[in-house]
Amino acid sequence: MEAARDGAAPEVARDGAAPEVARDLGIYVHVPFCAVRCGYCDFNTYAPGEAAGATREGYVEAALAEMAMAWGTMHGDGRPARTVFFGGGTPTMLDPAALAALLAGVRATWGLADDAEVTTEANPDSVTPESLATLAEAGFTRVSLGMQSAVPHVLATLDRTHEPANVARAVEGARAAGLAVSLDLIYGTPGESLADWRTSLETAIALGPDHVSAYALVIEPGTRMGGQLRRGEIAATDPDTQADMYELADTLLSEAGYSWYEVSNWARTPADACRHNVAYWHSQDWWGVGPGAHSYLGPGPDGTGARRWWNVKHPRAYAARLAAGESPAAEVEPLSAEDLALEAVMLRLRLADGIPRSLVEGRSEQIARLVGDGLLDGRDALAGTLRLTRRGRLLADLAVRALAF
Amino acid sequence: MSADPRIEPASTQPELIRNFCIIAHIDHGKSTLADRMLQLTGVVEARQMKAQYLDRMDIERERGITIKSQAVRMPWESDGTPHALNMIDTPGHVDFTYEVSRSLAACEGAVLLVDAAQGIEAQTLANLYLAMENELEIIPVLNKIDLPAADPERYAKELAQLVGCQPEDVMRVSGKTGEGVAELLDRIVRDIPAPVGDADAATRAMIFDSVYDTYRGVVTYVRVVDGKLSPRERIEMMSTGASHDLLEIGVISPEPVITKGLGVGEVGYLITGVKDVRQSRVGDTVTAARRPAQESLGGYEDPKPMVYSGLYPIDGSDYPVLRDALDKLKLNDAALIYEPETSAALGFGFRVGFLGLLHLEIVRERLEREFDLALISTAPNVIYEVTMEDGTQHVVTNPSEFPGGKIGEVREPMVRSTIIAPSEYIGAIMELCQSKRGNLISMDYLSEERVEMRYTLPLAEIVFDFFDQLKSRTRGYASLDYDVEGDQAAALVKVDILLQGDPVDAFSAIVHKDAAYSYGVMMTAKLKELIPRQQFEVPIQAAVGSRIIARETIRAIRKDVLAKCYGGDISRKRKLLEKQKEGKKRMKNIGSVEVPQEAFIAALNTSEPAEKSDKKK
């Protein structure tokens, strides 16, 4: 790891004219603000009063300044952004005009592809039909709503403050504005039963979203729930129950016409998949703007120069760096060919498209064993593609280990 | 060392010599008292004083116990006459009973040192018996009288009763403050008999210790009984007939001081240039080659290991390091024996024989500390003699050697144990000893509140977790001593532990048939906790022969995937994978089951060897 405090942005592009880069470019904008911090959250976000100086003032200016700096670093290689994703935090804590200004910044810096996908995450409570219409007008195409659950006691355990009914209103508002809709769900919350989970899934399906993400709750140490778990105030959900919940999600979503395209993601049609996220799993380039955001630029034509870096976390430190004309990068991680090969297996195996057999050298015995144990689809493997079965999706990390070492 | 020619080494008359040792329990302050004596007699300046000068090894200092004895010569003027006092330090632990007995044989008297706040402990009692059998003059002393908790009245009575004197004859000292120490030195001169020997007879000196020194080779500590040892003469070891040239002879005061020899009754050291303590064994008699003695002093015994354990490097590539380390330790430890051994579960290692559990623990600690080795030690095992129905015999030091087929008889070593505890714990102790197949021989009250119980017990029960249990059932108040004595036939069986039907040799154990079930249940349950879930169900079984006596099942893992893997998660996740890849190197495959090395360590190490807690009363 090298420190990147020398004032220059991480040097990634090669000298001379902008090279032809075959990879797509995506832009991620991190908005590190929330109304309240949820008990399970370990993201880089700040609720009012949580950390001195982490206010929204100056955030937009700083983010725009980073964009300008990014363009210089990339030597303006001419690629427009094919996808933009506003995540957080709660991006909709910013008013729609601010989000529109940031998107305008992206457009002014890199340009937007004609068919660009532009998503923002949103809390069902922090959007209105008007704000959604404003976003659509500014160029947003998609909204991902943090529904999490339809069951009040589950939402309460998660510290989610929204009214379950607000989700339907938000979906309706997004539709009316012409935005594609994704719903985020969480399963395995302490105290959540399989029946509770079924209720949440059925409620989500009834809202007719274009896309559903379902994530098993991970309770990290250092979060409020981590503390409750340590003190024995809550009990972690048995991983076998989580597996049952995953299978129920896959069953109900499949029956409703959704197809899985990544371990935790289902789409109504292939076109409804989140292209921005798919780009991560295919190791495309992305620039992460904002405090704590990660960026990745792949290798040059000679196969070297790939690196990932991440910005300083605190909004004030981030703004101060940019105000001083310095790169906000905290650390840069150069990536070797071996690192990239491992990441390719680790990321692409999560996808329904699977990975070409050629991506893993040798490993015939391991592949045969994964097929025999029902983790990889046997017919696909014979045809040259390694694709996870449903059982395999639940054991994807185990499969990656078997293939990678 | 001394200006007075009357106590010059090699020419001191036996009448001016006093040879004594200090018998004390761990932590009763022997080293502190010894330090104070060194200071008072002027052989160590206060500013040079390293706390507890005599305990040289780090482990000894940390554990507060003495492993190797040494002898220090101190001048002391009493009633206007200079005397040479030789203080012979003795190991205080039952594992080293033989070494204790040789140290005692080098003395005419013993200071019985007891903590005035704690009273006598079982091991001290055992050594006191040894001293009285050797007809040593005993000087009873209560130490730590400066402590607020000291109860000298009560313990003086106890000691007086044991030694057969009046309570007022029991001396009271404080090694810490120095109170009473000068009086004790005077009392040593007054009460302990001077050595007796024939200066004109053929030379005979008894080896009571033998220590390997990196720079000097083996340093041998002797007590001259008859004749004289002189520099540069040729000496002979009477048990082997091997002869060596005396390169150096001297006394310790407390640094080595070269002398013109050692005469009757004197105590000192010899250096001959040999590199292995086996060539200069404790208990052997040294004589002069020019005029060898006809008869040895007697009492020599070969060290006999009582407990065996497998020692394996956690990192298999450390095997050569372990071999070299054992070879080096052997130079300084005549009782250490070992041979290579292979375990399907643990790889290459050594089967090592020890005098007892403390010896095991010390060797293991030295290997880890001095040679930077990370080791797994298998459960300690005693020596069983198995006779088959067809009359063939097997000696079993490892459960894997336990024969299958028709067994006629299994014999196991027994110990005679002494337990001293407050009388309120009699019931708890009886219950424990009964559950460990013990037989009560006798019970005596040392005082109104303290009782001494004697049991015969199988050694195998003692080496398991007896001491821990004794301590916990008596809130730490009981003390234990034991001596191996005889053997008995017993209904012993081998319990195997199977993972997916494959036996895991490291977990096999020889236990009494009544305990087989509980061992099986305990070990299968423990392994179920320790072995991570696999892709498939893994049965863990305990079996005696082909009969399954306990079973647990590790459920197949169903979910092993991180739900979220987006831009900000990728580096962290790749690093986790790289770490897991490293971890895989520490996995052992038992059949198709991957078992982390840590699981073996945890399963084998959960019961702490008994003496580990011994230093804490």
Image (cartoon, rainbow, N blue to C red):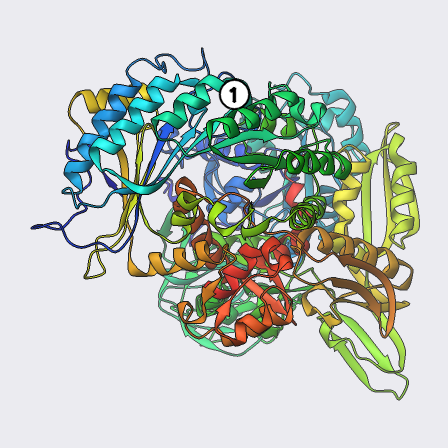
**In the rendered image, the vertical position of residue A61 relative to residue B546, given as above or below:** above
Give the amino acid at mark 1. Arg
Residue at figure coordinates x 58%, y 34% from the top left? A219
**In the rendered image, the vertical position of residue A206 relative to residue A273, given as above or below:** above
Residue at figure coordinates x 58%, y 59% from the top left? B597
Please, which chain is the residue tagged with disc 1 on?
A
B306 with respect to A111 (left or right) = right
Q: Is residue B328 visible?
A: no
- Name which quarter of the figure residue B420 lies in: top right
Image spot of residue B152 (x, y percent): 72, 22
- Secondary element type, mark 1: loop
Q: Is residue B147 visible?
A: yes
The N terminus of chain B: image quadrant: top left
B586 with respect to A336 (left or right) = right
Image spot of residue B283 (x, y percent): 60, 64
Nearest to the observer: residue A140 or residue B344: A140
Question: Label 1 belongs to which residue?
Answer: A37
Q: Neighbour class for label 1 at 10 Å: few (<14), some, many (≥20)?
A: many
Image spot of residue A99 (x, y percent): 35, 23
Residue at figure coordinates x 46%, y 49% from the top left? B576
Nearest to the observer: residue B360 or residue B293: B360
Image spot of residue B342 (x, y percent): 60, 74
A222 with respect to B248 (left or right) = right
Nearest to the observer: residue B330 or residue B2: B330
The C terminus of chain B: image quadrant: top right
- Name which quarter of the figure residue B311 lies in: bottom right
Residue at figure coordinates x 82%, y 77% from the top left? B386
